[in-house]
Image: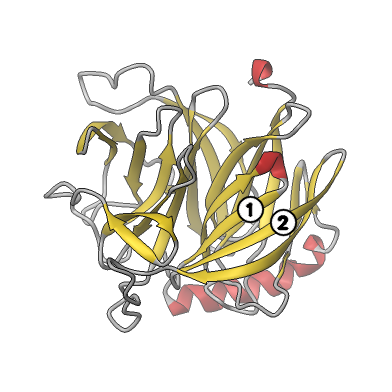
Amino acid sequence: MRLRSAITLSLGAAAIALSAAWAAGLTGSERRFEIEGNGLRIGGLSGLAVLDYGARFLALSDEGFLIEGSFTRDANGLTGAKATRSIPLGGPGGRALDARGKEHDSEGLAISSDGALSVSFEHVHRVAKYREPGIALPYPALMRGLDLPENGGIEALAVDTQDRLYIVQEQSAHGGDVPLMRLEGGRWSVLGKIHPSDGFVPVGADFGPDGMYYLLERKVATLGFRSRIRRFDLSQPAPEVDGIFPAEVIWQSGLSLGNLEGLAIWTDPQGVVHATMVADNNFSAVLYGGMVSLVLAKSVGTM
């Protein structure tokens, strides 16, 4: 989601004031690190996937580009990221996406077991499949009556172990609960509802190795952003009374971690489970545009 310019300016001032506190690269139990661009245009990152047990990543820019890269790490987790390639996403038939018509505003990213990418777009609301970045393969059209704001569309994508795609919009045009939808057998269905609370809205999602659904949420505060991760058990149906899936907050940030929008839950070669997030800086030099990573559990059995 692109932020309004007034918010960007005020948060930019806050980012400068807090830069000294960020210099050490650590905020509590979280590790915060920049992405080395290698001359590539890196910014506006809103989707993330971590591959090969923490060796590589794919990030998604809201200008319609995939960023490939690799990580550095030590015994305690990730220490840095380096971009190696930037690849433009295409439209159906391989045509270029129309930037003037905001067709290129890619927001959510998920990867199936066969390596196919699912990407969501807002402004021109849709979800597309990519077996190669230059050619979009359309999914079934989104359900009618979703009440999608122009700048608050489908941001949180996740694929489960059965390669079923789950999507959640950032917000509804009139506020309130938002539907959790799943694509199965060529059809979208609504499984239940996500209830936004305390000013947080959904911006990223992933399934963990425990089979639970993890939702990254973001809140715009006076002097910056706050983020949190909530965990849902989707193996249980949503309550019939209100259809809202129950959830627990498993992590919440302070103000100094940036506008986190993409989430990847992954396991390293030692079996440690990590949550890594990427920040959308709106291509601003004063806003943070790197990554934040933390350990969720020492093993799947302790989650």
Q: Is residue 277 visible?
A: yes
Residue visible at 25% across and 52% down?
172
Residue farthest to the bottom, as pictured:
100
Residue visible at 72% across and 71% down?
17
The x and y percentages for residue 27 are 76, 50
Is 199 on the left or on the right of 59, as rendered? Answer: left
At mark 1, the secondary structure is: strand
Say which of 215 and 73 sits in front: 73
Residue visible at 68% across and 67% down?
84
Residue type marked 2: Ser
Q: Mark 2 and mark 1 in contact (Cβ < 8 Å)? A: yes
State whether residue 77 is above or below residue 59: above
Residue farthest to the left, as pictured:
144
State whether residue 284 is above or below residue 83: below
Q: Can residue 152 be seen in this view?
A: no
State whether residue 172 is above or below residue 222: above
User: Which corner quadrant holds the N terminus?
Assistant: bottom left
The x and y percentages for residue 134 are 41, 67
The x and y percentages for residue 122 are 32, 63
Residue at which label 1 appears = 57
Is 286 on the left or on the right of 157, as rendered? Answer: right
Is 79 on the left or on the right of 53, as rendered? Answer: right
Say which of 289 and 186 sits in front: 186
Whichever of labels 1 and 2 marks the residue nearer the N terminus, that label is 1
Residue at which label 2 appears = 70
User: Which corner quadrant holds the C terminus?
Assistant: top right
